[in-house]
């Protein structure tokens, strides 16, 4: 069976994020750039199709990244948390925004002009390499979801998704591992290519097995090991992205 991380690391910034992976010196230099801005809940920070001339570093809050297909269907692609960078792809290649970023609640971000961000990467090769690694991980995440769509039924896909989200963002608590991000059943379905009714049925089944508990925009993994077994995965100690000096 494949392995999946079962908990978070101990970095001051959430593990797997851009700021967590940077060395202390590179992080401080980046955080000295741009200006801070506070966004209200449900605010569109950047919109699919628009030109991209800003990079946003999330300092507080949650941001959902979604995209709309030509037929009008909208899918949730990812969730970004504090420490994540948003809008970097459009700045790097000069293309239009490939997705829309919307705040889940009050969100604070550092806004950095595109040319300033590019100059920062040119001056600090370790930061540029870190961003390249991060983008590679995003692609691996997307590829893994596509492979699971093709190779597993929806219930296994959802179990794998819950474990993957918990590995990146989860918070342990008295009831179990909270996913750490508020996701509706529609949004969970969007991440695995399933209808809301299918997600509802799967969650009821997982709950009946004692593997998860659900609430309003909330999923708690009660038994990580058993859910991993259901998903044909083995738990693995958390990955440690230790920052390296420039």
Image (cartoon, grey):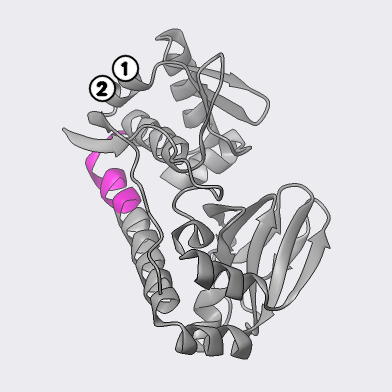
Tag shown at residue 229:
2
Tell me the quarter of the picture where residue 192 sits.
Answer: top left
Q: Is residue 82 magenta?
A: no
Identify the residue shown where x is 45% and y is 43%. 168
Helix, strand or loop under label 1: helix
Identify the residue shown where x is 23% and y is 36%. 3
Q: Which residues are magenta?
A: 144-153
Q: Is 241 or 182 nearer to us in this picture?
A: 241
Q: Is 213 or 107 nearer to us in this picture?
A: 107
Q: Position of residue 101 (x, y in %)?
A: 65, 62
Identify the residue shown where x is 56% and y is 20%. 173
Q: Is residue 126 above or below residue 9?
A: below
Tell me the quarter of the picture where residue 194 sits.
Answer: top left
Q: Main secondary structure of the magenta part?
A: helix
Q: Position of residue 195 (x, y in %)?
A: 50, 38
Tell me the quarter of the picture where residue 4 sits.
Answer: top left
Q: Is residue 146 magenta?
A: yes
Tag shown at residue 226:
1
Q: Position of residue 222 (x, y in %)?
A: 46, 16
Q: Is residue 77 above or below residue 222?
A: below
- Other residues around mark 1 within 10 Å, as few (<14) / some (14–19) / many (≥20): some
Residue 99 appears left or right of 42: left
Q: CA distance from mark 2 to mark 1?
A: 5 Å
Q: Position of residue 71 (x, y in %)?
A: 55, 64
Q: Quadrant of the N terminus?
A: top left
Marks 2 and 1 close (CB-CB < 8 Å): yes
Confirm whether residue 189 shows in the render. yes
Q: Quadrant of the C terminus?
A: bottom left
Confirm whether residue 95 shows in the render. no
């Amino acid at each position: 069976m494949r392995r999946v991380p079962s908990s978070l690391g101990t970095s001051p910034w959430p593990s797997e994020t851009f700021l967590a992976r940077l060395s202390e010196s590179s992080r401080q230099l980046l955080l000295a750039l741009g200006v801070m801005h506070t966004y209200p809940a449900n605010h569109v920070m950047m919109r699919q199709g628009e030109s991209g001339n800003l990079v946003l570093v999330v300092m507080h809050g949650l941001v959902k990244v979604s995209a709309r297909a030509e037929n009008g269907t909208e899918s949730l692609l990812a969730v970004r948390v504090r420490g994540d960078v948003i809008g970097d792809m459009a700045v790097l290649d000069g293309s239009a925004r490939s997705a829309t970023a919307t705040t889940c609640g009050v969100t604070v971000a550092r806004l950095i002009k595109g040319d300033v961000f590019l100059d920062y990467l040119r001056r600090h090769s370790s930061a540029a390499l870190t961003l390249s690694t991060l983008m590679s991980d995003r692609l691996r995440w997307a590829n893994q979801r596509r492979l699971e769509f093709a190779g597993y039924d929806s219930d296994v896909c959802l179990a794998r998704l819950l474990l993957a989200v918990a590995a990146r963002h989860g918070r342990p608590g008295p009831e179990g591992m909270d996913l750490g991000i508020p996701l509706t059943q529609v949004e969970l379905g969007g991440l695995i290519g399933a209808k809301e009714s299918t997600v509802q049925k799967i969650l009821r089944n997982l709950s009946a097995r004692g593997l998860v508990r659900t609430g309003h925009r909330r999923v708690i993994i009660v038994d990580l090991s058993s859910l991993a077994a259901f998903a044909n995965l083995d738990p693995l100690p958390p990955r440690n992205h230790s920052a390296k000096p420039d």
